[in-house]
Image: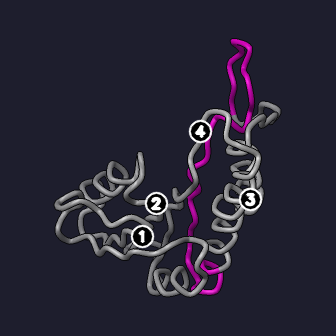
Amino acid sequence: MSDRIQFVLVTGATGAVGPRVVHALHYAYAGCQIRAFSVDTPTSAIFPQSVEVLIGDVTDKAAVQSAMQGVDAVIHMAALLHIVNPPPEMREKYECVNIGGTATVVEAAIKAGVKRVVLFSTIAVYGPSDSHVLNEMSSTNPDTFYAQTKLSAEQIV
């Protein structure tokens, strides 16, 4: 059995970074199949023609399980993104998408026998840097709903 990645699912493919990741995969790994999974319908010609597009939500277990079928790896970028001073009632939505969605993706990947899950997180999990250099060994101190839920997502993965 080969460990070569031949089929990649990209969640959040239409988001802020998603199209660039899809294009990078397409050009760096010629012959690799790519499935783009997003809650938003992509604009015309946003992805190379060979990219399979599925519309769905990472909080929908059935949709995620279906999207996961046959893939070797997942690049999980789907998230409710940072907004400045969100109202308190948004905490639940951040938890649902960023934590619950990540749990759904990871559970479906395990069930489908996926070889690798890559999570896009954020430097925000470290909180304010106070001009210090941060790296993966730095202490976390998330101070927003977004950062707190992304740290929880990291812990799931």
Q: Residues within 10 Å of mark 1 (few under 14, many from 20)?
A: many
Q: Secondary structure at mark 1?
A: strand
Q: Considering only order in the chain, which callout, 3 or 1, is on the residue closer to the N terminus?
A: 1
Instruction: Please state if 26 lies on the left or on the right of 109 as rendered.
Output: left
Separation of disc 2 and disc 1 at Cα? 6 Å
Furthest residue toward top: 131
Residue drawn at 61 percent across, 81 percent down: 108
Q: Residues within 10 Å of mark 2 (few under 14, many from 20)?
A: many
What amino acid is at disc 2? Gly
Q: Position of residue 43 (x, y in %)?
A: 24, 59
Q: Considering only order in the chain, which callout, 1 or 2, is on the residue closer to the N terminus?
A: 2
Range of magenta residues: 108-135
For mark 4, what is the residue? Answer: 83
Separation of disc 3 and disc 2 at Cα? 19 Å
Q: Position of residue 149 (x, y in %)?
A: 73, 51
Residue drawn at 70 percent across, 67 percent down: 100
Q: Considering only order in the chain, which callout, 4 or 2, is on the residue closer to the N terminus?
A: 2
Q: Position of residue 95 (x, y in %)?
A: 73, 59
Query: In the rendered image, which quarter is residue 102 located in?
Result: bottom right
Query: In the rendered image, which quarter is residue 37 located in?
Result: bottom left
